[in-house]
Image (cartoon, helix red, strand yellow):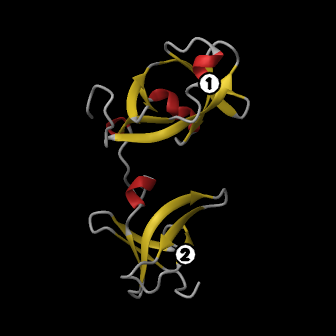
Amino acid sequence: MTTGGQLSSELEVVGRILGVHGVQGWVKVFSHTDPRENLQHYQPWHLKQGGQWKPVKVTGFRPQGKGLIAQLEGITDRNMAAALVGQDIGIPRDLLPRSGGGEYYWRDLIGLRVFHKDGADFGKVARMLETGANDVIEVRGDSKSLDRRERLIPWLPEDVVIDVDLAEGRMIVDWDPEF
């Protein structure tokens, strides 16, 4: 990671400032971590301000209703907190636990080439979607693929997703090519 507030490719976005809470500078936060409360364990947070990531210390953190709130060092009133709304929360990637045993960070799946188990090229993983029932892989066809369609394929390891090979940059699925 670079210093001096420079944008770092080694930062992972793990949350976002959603709003303000109260008059003493607390902010409402959304967490991409699972469980969501894990966000508090990654210090310091980095907020993207003016195109640059700037570190900020979390001095208070707690669940509030169905969400989370945090107190950030130096943010002492509602107006200061309001200026942070909409900013992503980033942390150094090396703070995150290593994935393994069939678990993947979504960022690692984006860009993988997706093939049907019989070899048909569906395109590349464009993004992952959280739907509640199960996660979904959005695959977009391109000039190298079977067609240029967009497919939504459920993330069901062993049932639909047969193999993921990050080193080879590919994913094998058992999914109807016509669907």
Instruction: Give, as a three-letter code, the residue at label 2.
Output: Arg
Q: Nearer the viewer, residue 19 or 97?
A: 19
Residue under the image location 48 percent in, 40 percent down: 14
User: Is residue 71 visible to the viewer in this orientation of the structure?
Assistant: yes
Give x and y (percent) for residue 23. 69, 14
SS of the residue at dot 2?
strand
Q: Which residue is mark 1?
A: 82
CA distance for labels 1 and 2: 39 Å
**Vertical placement of 46 versus 173: above or below?**
above
Task: Identify the secondary structure beneath mark 1.
Answer: helix
Percent of width and height locating residue 91: 40, 34
- Determine the residue positioned at 64% across, 12% down: 24
The part of the image, by quadrant, that contains residue 31 is top right
In the rendered image, the quadrant that contains the C terminus is bottom right
Q: Quadrant of the N terminus?
A: top left
Instruction: Name the residue located 45 percent from the left edge and 41 percent from the top edge.
Output: 13
Q: In this image, 74 relative to 166: left or right?
A: right
Which residue in the structure is indicated by mark 2? Answer: 151
Upstream in sequence: badge 1 or badge 2: 1
- In the displayed structure, 64 sits above or below 33; it is above
Q: Position of residue 138 (x, y in %)?
A: 52, 67
Rendered residue at 54%/75% (across/down): 151
Q: Quadrant of residue 84?
A: top right
Amino acid type of the residue that numbered disc 1 sits on in the rendered structure: Ala
Tell me: residue 166, above or below residue 40: below
